[in-house]
């Protein structure tokens, strides 16, 4: 509305200038200098009118597009964002194209597609079904959980969050392994608080081996699963691999909590290499 008012006032000024110009034209002998000045002003006004008209059209278009985007988001995520989140699974297929078909074990943490909620920048986008290909390091997505439904690959983007039915999230993060190397990959949230625990599931592929002789049997191709745990301390912007040794774990605990925590571990017979015990220990620290 402000732009429309501006154009109206400029048009009014243009009309007055043009009127003056006609008068000057009638007396061009006496006012030739003034006429030249007025012509210059008219040309300037024409340019300003063109610019302001463009701004008006652009502003209306932007407001309309913004309104459409807001309506789409309120309905559960825009089509453009969801299309960005869900790509193909070509990278996973490429990694597995030369692998034997007959393999022991599974590349997935769960062969079944499980229900979850997809978020982008903490805003809900869509209900989905997912499974994690730990060998291909890829989350596979279905919009509906039917055998013939198309399967998409979730983009590797740190703004994307996948929340499971138990309320725990999984996302693409940067972390540091026990060798001090910076890595990128998917981490699943296990416990949150001052001490946030993540779980990383990894799968390695071992090629088949032919029998070398009658004493050593052939071994088939197989997938082997490995698990790593990572810890993020409150106020510290980094995620480090957690070595499950009591003395190394205690170094991460604040001095004010260390003695009480040592007592808790001893009294409850906590074995940090056991996942259920590890969860108990982190839950205790976060009280």
Image (spheres, rainbow, N blue to C red):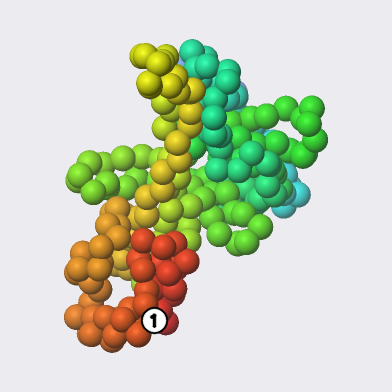
Above or below for 119 versus 111:
below
Q: Quadrant of the C terminus?
A: bottom left
Above or below for 216 versus 241:
above
When asked about the image quadrant of residue 234, the answer is: bottom left
**Residue 170 in sight from this viewpoint:** yes
Q: Residue 278's x, y, as percent?
A: 40, 67
- The answer to which of 67 and 108 lies nearer the viewer is 108
- The answer to which of 114 and 58 lies nearer the viewer is 114
Residue farthest toward the front in the current orientation of the protein: 214
Say whether residue 22 is left or right of residue 195: right
**Residue 20 in sight from this viewpoint:** no
* Residue at (75% x, 49% y) in the render: 75
Q: Residue 211's x, y, as percent?
A: 41, 15
**Number of marks in the image?**
1
Q: Secondary structure at mark 1?
A: loop
Q: Which residue is mark 1?
A: 268
* Residue at (54% x, 34% y) in the render: 105
- The answer to which of 281 and 44 lies nearer the viewer is 281
Label 1 crowd bin: few (<14), some (14–19), many (20+), radius 10 Å: few
* Residue at (44% x, 19% y) in the render: 218
């Amino acid at each position: 509305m402000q732009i429309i008012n501006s154009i109206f006032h400029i048009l009014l000024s243009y009309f007055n200038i043009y009127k003056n110009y006609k008068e000057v034209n009638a007396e061009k002998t006496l006012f030739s200098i003034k006429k030249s000045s007025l012509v210059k002003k008219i040309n300037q006004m024409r340019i300003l009118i063109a610019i302001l008209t463009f701004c008006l059209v652009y502003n209306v278009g932007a407001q309309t597009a913004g309104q459409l985007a807001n309506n789409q988001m309120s309905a559960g995520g825009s089509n453009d964002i969801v299309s960005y989140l869900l790509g193909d699974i070509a990278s996973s297929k490429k990694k597995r194209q030369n692998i034997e078909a007959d393999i022991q074990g599974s590349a997935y943490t769960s062969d079944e597609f499980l229900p979850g909620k997809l978020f982008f920048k903490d805003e809900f986008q869509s209900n989905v079904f997912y499974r994690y290909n730990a060998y291909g390091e890829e989350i596979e997505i279905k919009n509906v959980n039917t055998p013939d439904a198309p399967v998409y690959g979730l983009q590797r983007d740190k703004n994307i969050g996948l929340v499971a039915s138990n309320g725990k999230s999984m996302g693409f993060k940067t972390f540091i392994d026990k060798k001090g190397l910076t890595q990128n990959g998917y981490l699943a949230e296990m416990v949150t608080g001052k001490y946030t625990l993540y779980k990383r599931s990894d799968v390695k592929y071992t090629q088949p081996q032919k029998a070398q002789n009658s004493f050593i049997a052939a071994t088939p191709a197989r997938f082997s699963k490995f698990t790593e745990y990572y810890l993020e301390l409150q106020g510290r912007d980094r995620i480090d691999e957690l070595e499950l040794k009591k003395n190394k774990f205690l170094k991460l605990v604040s001095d004010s909590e260390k003695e009480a925590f040592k007592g808790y571990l001893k009294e409850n017979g906590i074995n940090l290499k056991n996942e259920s015990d590890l969860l108990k220990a982190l839950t205790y620290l976060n009280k």
